């Protein structure tokens, strides 16, 4: 299957922040590739949602939030150290410096303030770097080819000519990734871009140059090539080997004439207009869709072998399974907990909700403040320090 990072690489900054990207009539989650289709109504807990709205529901239920998902990515993707990831997670919960220090068991409150400053510096540097790279790309005709991304989307040019491919390269790659021959299935699509291009040009030969395909027909053909046929289809389009209508109604090889393409585009626009009219008719349904309610609370991760616990709070208890995921990946923010998880194994631990924060209709009610006070009560009750837990010693946490 396609790796999670692959979806992020093809999404724009705004699409990443939003959590999904639009591809014709489809909405695709950048976190996992989950797909919804315009024109289909999705039921969830007795409420009906149109495609775009349901995608937001999916992101919240499956990933908690885009922020939480991105924070769980590997250091090689985010460039963040474990300490920085831990701090950002705590800041996202709206915790104060002293609360962050207590939760992570590192340094003192003043240490946390210093880390805040470093993160702000990193943000300012990132803005300048992004501006520099955008300016460099705008001068792509003068810049070295290696500075220009070989795979882009949404109408950007893909520089296929930058690949220096010999017949020997082509034969070697095809033999490696098509062990049953080029007419058989693809072994994997996890490969460098140059190899991807060689593989994709071979896959493109399975399409008839004089034929137009529906998306279903394309999918059925590509399913015989690779299990993640959506990824293959996307790359065929990105490399310009396969073209399609804006609404995804028809696909064809790039060798079709301009006249044919123009005729197909006209039909595509007509269909797209019809899709829009259908969406407008469902607008009332969308406005009536209810927001998915979230519950804040306190949870613990308990080692059943020695009784030690790690406790923390969250504004959305549906996301606590993300803690298990981080532990399984060896990237949990609490190093003491991660070390014993590795030592005792997953079966030695349970993740439990200790308390669900009660809703309060008082207009002055601050859920983050109430959650912080609730967490402090559990710290006082369980004292998860030293031999009893995975947090820093009590004296240090009180500083």
Image (cartoon, helix red, strand yellow):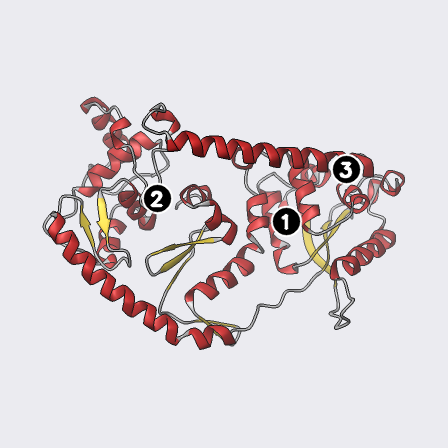
Q: Nearer the viewer, residue 111 or 118?
A: 118
Mark 1 to mark 3: distance in Å?
25 Å
Residue bearing mark 2: 153
Relative vertical location of residue 165 with respect to residue 53 in this rendering, above or below: above
Q: Earlier in the sequence, mark 2 or mark 1?
A: 2
**Residue 42 placement: quadrant:** bottom left
Q: Quadrant of the C terminus?
A: top right
**Residue 344 placement: quadrant:** top right
Image point (30%, 38%), residue name: 157
Mark 3 to mark 2: distance in Å?
40 Å
Q: Secondary structure at mark 3?
A: helix
Q: Nearer the viewer, residue 374 or 260?
A: 260
Mark 2 to mark 1: distance in Å?
33 Å
Residue 31 in view of the camera: no
Q: Nearer the viewer, residue 39 or 130?
A: 130
Provide residue 61's location: percent of width, then percent of height: 55, 61
Please tell me whether mark 1 or mark 3 is closer to you in this view: 3
Q: Secondary structure at mark 1?
A: helix
Relative vertical location of residue 9 with respect to residue 133 in this rendering, above or below: below
Residue bearing mark 3: 113
Provide residue 195's location: percent of width, then percent of height: 30, 31
Q: Which mark is residue 64?
A: none
Residue 60 in view of the camera: yes
Q: Earlier in the sequence, mark 1 or mark 3?
A: 3
Few, some or many residues within 10 Å of mark 2 (<14, 14–19, 20+):
some
Provide residue 381's location: percent of width, then percent of height: 86, 55
Q: Earlier in the sequence, mark 3 or mark 2?
A: 3
Relative vertical location of residue 102 with respect to residue 277 in this rendering, above or below: above
Image point (24%, 33%), residue name: 198
Provide residue 151's location: percent of width, then percent of height: 34, 37
């Amino acid at each position: 299957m396609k790796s999670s990072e692959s979806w992020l690489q093809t999404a724009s900054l705004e699409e990443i922040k939003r959590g999904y990207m639009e591809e014709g009539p489809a909405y695709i989650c950048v976190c996992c590739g989950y797909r919804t289709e315009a024109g289909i109504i999705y039921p969830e807990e007795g409420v009906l949602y149109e495609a775009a709205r349901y995608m937001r529901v999916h992101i919240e239920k499956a990933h908690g939030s885009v922020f939480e998902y991105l924070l769980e990515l590997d250091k090689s993707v985010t460039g963040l150290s474990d300490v920085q990831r831990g701090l950002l997670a705590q800041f996202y919960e709206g915790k104060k410096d002293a609360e962050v220090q207590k939760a992570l068991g590192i340094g003192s409150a003043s240490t946390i303030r210093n880390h805040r400053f470093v993160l702000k510096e990193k943000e300012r540097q990132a803005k300048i770097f992004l501006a520099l790279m955008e300016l460099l790309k705008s001068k792509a005709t003068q810049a070295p080819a290696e500075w220009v991304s070989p795979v882009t989307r949404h109408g950007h040019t893909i520089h296929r000519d930058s690949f220096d491919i010999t017949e020997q390269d082509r034969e070697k790659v095809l033999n490696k990734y098509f062990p049953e021959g080029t007419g058989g299935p693809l072994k994997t699509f996890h490969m460098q871009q140059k190899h991807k291009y060689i593989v994709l040009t071979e896959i493109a030969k399975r399409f008839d140059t004089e034929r137009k395909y529906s998306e279903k027909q394309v999918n059925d053909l590509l399913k015989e090539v690779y299990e993640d046929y959506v990824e293959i289809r996307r790359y065929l389009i990105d490399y310009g080997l396969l073209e399609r209508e804006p609404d995804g109604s028809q696909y064809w090889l790039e060798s079709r004439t301009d006249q044919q393409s123009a005729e197909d585009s006209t039909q595509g626009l007509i269909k797209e207009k019809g899709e829009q009219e259908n969406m407008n008719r469902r607008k009332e349904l969308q406005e009536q869709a209810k927001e998915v309610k979230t519950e804040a609370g306190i949870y613990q991760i308990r080692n059943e072998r020695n009784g030690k616990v790690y406790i923390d709070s969250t504004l959305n208890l549906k996301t606590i399974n993300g803690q298990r995921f981080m532990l399984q990946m060896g990237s949990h923010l609490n190093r003491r907990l991660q070390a014993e998880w590795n030592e005792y194994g997953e079966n030695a631990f349970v993740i439990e909700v200790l308390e669900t924060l009660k809703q309060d209709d008082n207009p002055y009610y601050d859920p983050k403040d109430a959650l912080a006070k609730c967490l402090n009560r559990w710290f006082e009750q369980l004292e998860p320090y030293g031999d009893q837990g995975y947090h820093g010693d009590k004296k240090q946490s009180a500083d």
